[in-house]
């Protein structure tokens, strides 16, 4: 414990892909030639309404207020529509408007990219659908599409980078390293590949090698917010919290809607005993990205915070239940969070039941603290974290 987890990003796993071919439908964006379709004519007509979920179908999809671009998001990202105005959809989490032509309904996205492949079996189209599969957690299907893309174009660094990221997600780290090394050999100037290889090194707990790759990614692209975020995680793992905070701050400055950086900075504040800043960051993470890890982290905080003033058991139950439902009750730590939340509102029968379920799901769950949790519940007491705040410079090289 805590069950709060850092969130990281491998350039959203699969970065914008440069192509080497000339194509009559190509446009130039940020120095990279992108193959794009000028409309989503292959998507079925869809009449959106507030609350609908949409998926981006273009790289560097722009979210605007007036003429100002508030952010750019990658292909395959999912968002909820808050309101509509003509050809524009307002996405609250990105504080901007996106064109209908740049998205399709969430349930149409796979069909949209499959129809592109039916029209042209190109490496670009396999790559794009592979990216979508990856973002939706269908890693084997993503790897299959990346394999087909590489078969068609074995000299494109981005394809190996995409497959390496999918291998990382399936914990096939040695295969991932082979692909990242190949991508770097083909394109040593690609910052995202270094970011992604750093992510794999961190997964292997080789933090110094991860830091070296994140450093190189940042040298190649000082605007790459996710590289600062990921380097912050590595510094936090080394208990260099001052450096971690500085990197999270920089990531947020570069992308003020980067939910994962708020989440991770909140965890850093937790370790330092800065509970007011912690809750503020978790709230911002949920504002920009209302997803399962962020609900869980805030729920754990509200249920177990050492400072009474910051606890809210009833809201913790609501958030923890939402996290469990969204992951179909498959994530052990979220079930444990729900147990702690029920204890905070005095429902010790449910607290014990959910703790038992978490342990049945994973015998190693909370092995360092579950005895204290169980003892507290048996005595009809909520579980409160016992935290000795770390020093901001707890460890430095």
Image: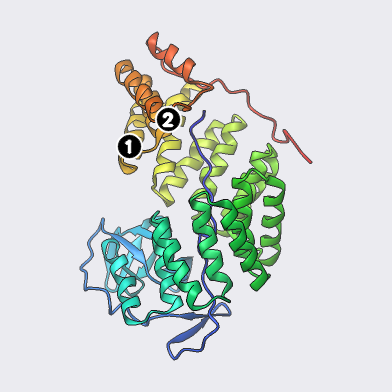
Please name whichever residue, 204 or 220, is drawn nearer the observer in this view of the structure. 204
Residue 77 visible in the current orientation: no
Picture quadrant where residue 223 is located: bottom right
Could you tell me residue 321's position as x and y percent?
32, 34
Left or right: residue 13 versus residue 312 is right
Could you tell me residue 106's position as x and y percent?
29, 61
* Residue in the picture at 39% in, 14% down: 377
Mark 2 and mark 1 residues within 8 Å of each other at the beta carbon: no
Please name whichever residue, 142 or 45, is drawn nearer the observer in this view of the structure. 142
Residue 266 against residue 16 in the figure, above or below: above
Residue 328 against residue 55 in the figure, above or below: above
* Residue in the picture at 65% in, 66% down: 221
Please name whichever residue, 195 or 228, is drawn nearer the observer in this view of the structure. 195
Please name whichever residue, 302 or 185, is drawn nearer the observer in this view of the structure. 185
Could you tell me residue 191's position as x and y percent?
63, 65
* Residue in the picture at 40% in, 54% down: 137
- Compare marks 2 and 1 and give the one earlier in the sequence: 1
Q: Callout 2: few (<14), some (14-19), or many (20+) C-alpha neighbours within 10 Å? A: few
Q: Secondary structure at mark 2?
A: loop
For disc 2, the marked residue is: 362
Q: CA distance from mark 2 to mark 1?
A: 13 Å
Picture quadrant where residue 119 is located: bottom left
Could you tell me residue 222's position as x and y percent?
66, 63
Residue 128 visible in the current orientation: yes
Using the image, tell me which numbered label, if any, was put on residue 307. Answer: none
Q: Quadrant of the C terminus?
A: top right
Q: Residue furthest top?
A: 379
Q: Secondary structure at mark 1?
A: loop
Q: Callout 1: few (<14), some (14-19), or many (20+) C-alpha neighbours within 10 Å? A: some
Using the image, tell me which numbered label, if any, was put on residue 329. Answer: 1
């Amino acid at each position: 414990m805590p069950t709060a987890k850092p969130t990281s990003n491998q350039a959203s796993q699969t970065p914008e892909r440069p192509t080497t071919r000339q194509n009559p439908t190509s446009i130039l964006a940020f120095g990279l030639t992108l193959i794009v379709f000028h409309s989503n004519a292959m998507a079925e007509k869809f009449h959106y309404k507030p609350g609908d979920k949409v998926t981006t179908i273009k790289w560097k999809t722009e979210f605007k207020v007036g003429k100002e671009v508030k952010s750019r998001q990658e292909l395959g990202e999912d968002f909820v529509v808050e309101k509509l105005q003509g050809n524009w959809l307002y996405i609250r989490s990105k504080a901007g408007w996106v064109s209908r032509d740049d998205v399709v309904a969430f349930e149409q996205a796979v069909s949209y990219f499959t129809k592109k492949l039916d029209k042209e079996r190109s490496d670009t189209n396999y790559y794009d659908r592979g990216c979508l599969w990856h973002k939706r957690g269908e890693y084997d299907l993503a790897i299959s599409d990346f394999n087909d893309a590489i078969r068609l174009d074995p000299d494109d660094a981005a394809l190996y980078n995409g497959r390496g990221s999918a291998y990382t997600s399936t914990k096939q780290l040695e295969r991932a390293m082979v692909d990242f090394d190949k991508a770097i050999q083909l394109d040593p100037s690609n910052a995202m590949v270094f970011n992604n290889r750093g992510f794999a090194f961190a997964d292997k707990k080789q933090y110094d090698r991860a830091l070296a790759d994140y450093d190189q990614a940042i040298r190649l692209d000082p605007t790459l917010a996710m590289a600062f975020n990921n380097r912050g995680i590595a510094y936090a793992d080394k208990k260099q919290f001052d450096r971690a905070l500085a990197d999270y701050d920089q990531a947020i400055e570069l992308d003020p809607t980067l939910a994962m950086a708020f989440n991770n900075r909140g965890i850093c504040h937790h370790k330092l005993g800065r509970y007011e800043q912690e809750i503020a960051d978790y709230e911002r993470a949920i504002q920009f990205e209302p997803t399962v890890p962020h609900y869980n982290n805030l729920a754990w905080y509200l249920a177990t915070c050492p400072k009474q003033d910051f606890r809210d058991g009833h809201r913790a139950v609501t958030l923890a239940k939402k996290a469990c439902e969204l992951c179909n009750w498959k994530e052990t730590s979220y079930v444990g969070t729900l147990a702690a939340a029920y204890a905070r509102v005095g429902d010790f029968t449910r607290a014990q039941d959910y703790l038992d379920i978490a342990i049945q799901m994973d015998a190693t769950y909370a092995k360092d603290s579950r005895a204290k949790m169980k003892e507290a519940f048996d005595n009809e007491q909520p579980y409160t974290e016992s935290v000795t705040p770390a020093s901001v410079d707890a460890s430095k090289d």
